[in-house]
Amino acid sequence: MNIDTSIEIRGSLDFDPAPLITFLRAELDAPNANVGIEQISGGQSNPTYKVNVGARRMVLRKQPMHIATKGAHAIDREYRVLTALGATDVPVPTPILFHADRDLIGTPFYLMDYIDGRVFSDAALPGVSATERHDIYLAMAKTLAQLHTVRPDAVGLADFGRPSGYFARQVGRWSGQLDASSRVKIDELVTLRDWIQKNIPEDDGQTSIAHGDFRIGNLMFHPTEPRVVAVLDWELSTIGHPLADLGFCCMPWNTSSGEYGGILDLDFTAMGIPSEAEFIAYYNDFLPEVGAPTPFHKAFALFRFAVIFVGIADRAAAGLAASENAAELEPLARRFAIRALELLDKAKV
């Protein structure tokens, strides 16, 4: 059997790489280049791979082979927002190409430039000094403010989502996904859903590009500096309300270290991590008009993540999960609902 030593595959692929390799060599005008494809571990959504063609280093993002939820895994929207933000101060990878057809690897996909940097899956930032932890958190707040400063119409995203009624739509969307799950029924999550549905704030007219999953784990930091070099995973991005992202950023202070890497049970002050209030205040230094998230915004963020965990558990049960540890995340749906209810009880709402 002849083995093509110019091609190296690492990790498992859910597609035949041969058509992709032929396409990439032609598209990048590198007919004889060595090609490497490596699955990037982590993440529960769109399968992601490191792709090398000669000296060109790239990242490929694709849809899963099976999509259960309408509108999910919106690869085209990811590519569009990366393209739109390329000329702004928001640090994003440079997109290279989008392939809409399923002919090559079974799903649409896009390519973007590979960036060297650090990604922290744990909000406690293990292995980092106290001073750098503090600066990393403030860099996250600054980067979020940079995103929310960008006006959608100025970068060609005026039609990326509806400018009003964001929370009402989001509550409806995630409540519907929870109701659609026949496998997981969690009393605390239902109680939380009912409270959220009854307490949607009035629309105050604020809009921004909303990332939808803005947290430490979706940011890449400079290899040696406390500076964000790339905001990743734009699957849930839309036109929304800035307090949705800011409330989502508050989750580490409201979940424990055993709950997807929170910091509630840690001495985060001694660790150098700013308080939630300091984090919010630093964001507001850039965008004072946004204000601070209310208990609703923080509870909604926890509710939404809990429903995401339910969806991950459903996909794991169906054998469609993107990550090997997907089944282990099911208990977190209940834990996040409990944390949200505790937050609301503490706030006396």
Image (tube, helix red, strand yellow):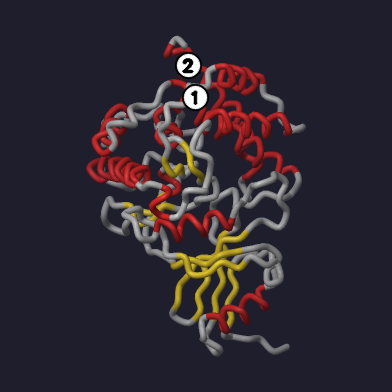
Check disc 1 and report its element: helix, strand or loop: helix
Percent across and percent down for residue 50 are: 52, 67
Check disc 2 and report its element: helix, strand or loop: helix
Q: Residue at x 47, y 51 (%)?
A: 157
Task: Answer above or below: position of 348 versus 69.
Answer: above
Q: CA distance from mark 2 to mark 1?
A: 7 Å
Of residues 217 and 249, the one nearer the viewer is: 249
Residue under label 2:
344
Of residues 152 and 266, the one nearer the viewer is: 152
Of residues 140 and 42, the one nearer the viewer is: 140
Which mark sits nearer the N-terminus, 2 or 1? 1
- Which of the labelled discs sits on residue 82, or is there none? none
- Which of the labelled discs sits on residue 299, or is there none? 1
Of residues 247 and 97, the one nearer the viewer is: 97
Q: Is residue 247 left or right of residue 275?
A: right
The quadrant where residue 6 appears: bottom right
Q: Residue at x 37, y 39 (%)?
A: 124
Amino acid type, residue under disc 2 in the picture: Leu
Task: Answer above or below: position of 181 versus 2.
Answer: above
